[in-house]
Amino acid sequence: MKRKSPPASSAAPSGDFASAAMLRVLRQGLLDLGLPPGAADPRGAEGRATVPLDDKRRLLAHALAVGGPACLALLGRGVHRFRHEPTHRALTSARDAADLFERWGRLERYIHSRHRVRLLRLEAGQARLHHVSLSPQTSSPQPAESLVVAGLLAALLEACGHRGVRCEINDAVQVYPRVDDGAALARAMAVGATADWCLRWSGHTAPETEPAPATAAPAGLAEGESWAGWVRQVFDQLAARLPSPPGMDELALSLGLSRRSAQRELQRQGTAFRTLLAEARFRSAGWWLLRSAAPLAEIGFLCGYADQSHFAREFRRRSGLPPVDYRRHFAVAPR
């Protein structure tokens, strides 16, 4: 039998902006269930959204106290209220379930989350996943945390256009869109058995195209370049698909070329796939820094950088200034 875990847990992957974004979603989820949302969401200085671990644990303890275990997986529905926030839009613009899970994994890697969602199997209409520690030295996800993340992924699937989304733990207890056996869920939590999930859906409808929010990075970041038309197309496709840009094979196919032919054409134009991708990330980051009030850590994720240090290092190498100083000196958006 697994060791019983304490009731409170981190409700989000460890990190800065993702933790704050998760707390906003969970508080909204509590409100939508008619429950008190707990303390206000603190935000850090210099465009960072830092939430101490104790704040996250207090929120989970609060949710358990006011709503019990049955509310935990339902809190993820709060994400539907934040569909125009940049990070949530980056997730909910996924084309399908596979793309969503890839984007979620990218977010976990970006913030160096101590816990990860592993996709074990993906089939038509269902996915099996496991919530695990990154390493043996890292403590396992606590039961409440696993339920919250499972529910959030279910809500994100809905936001991406999947219909009839359901989530079961251990192939036995449904926890989303409602709990079908409260006693069984309580027993699973008591023994720490909430990390194995099966997500199911009955169909998928691509959401209707919506106008981009005012903070969306614009098209035309290649304006002024003397690139050949199809090189500009490559750049535009890369910039438009951040933080999950298409790979070289997909781009070559869209141009009617083989991978090798596309690489040779780029070389003849004095550039390369990696060069264009780095430029797309840099120019997009510059736009976000100047024209939005999004937290710095969030901007790095939106632009597809591997993590916050990668963002800071590459932006400084190209601009001569760290992102925070670039924004401080040049931003034109109201702060």
Image (cartoon, rainbow, N blue to C red):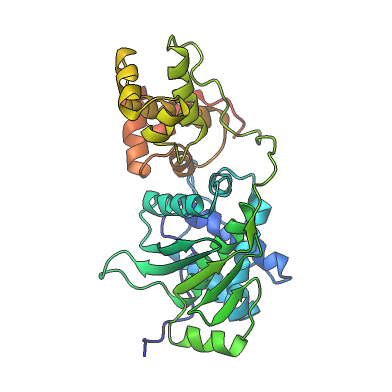
Name which residue lies at 46% across and 68% down: 128
Q: In this view, does 177 lie above or below 152?
A: below
Q: In this view, does 5 lie above or below 245?
A: below
Nearer to me, 200 or 138? 200
Q: On the picture, is 110 further left or further right than 219? A: left
Q: Can residue 4 be seen in this view?
A: yes
| Badge count | 0
Expressed as whole percent of the image width and height from the top left, the position of residue 216 reads: 59, 33
Expressed as whole percent of the image width and height from the top left, the position of residue 163 reads: 66, 60
Nearer to me, 257 or 24? 257
Q: Is residue 318 above or below residue 167?
A: above
Q: On the picture, is 115 further left or further right than 89? A: left
Quarter of the image for residue 255 reads top left
Name which residue lies at 70% across and 43% down: 208
Nearer to me, 220 or 140? 220
Q: Give the quarter of the figure containing the C terminus.
A: top right
Q: Give the quarter of the figure containing the N terminus.
A: bottom left
Q: Residue furthest left?
A: 137
Q: Is residue 320 visible?
A: no
Expressed as whole percent of the image width and height from the top left, the position of residue 262 reads: 35, 23
Q: Residue furthest right?
A: 34
Expressed as whole percent of the image width and height from the top left, the position of residue 170 reads: 48, 79
Q: Is residue 286 above or below residue 11?
A: above
Name which residue lies at 42% across and 35% down: 250
Q: On the picture, is 19 further left or further right than 179? A: left
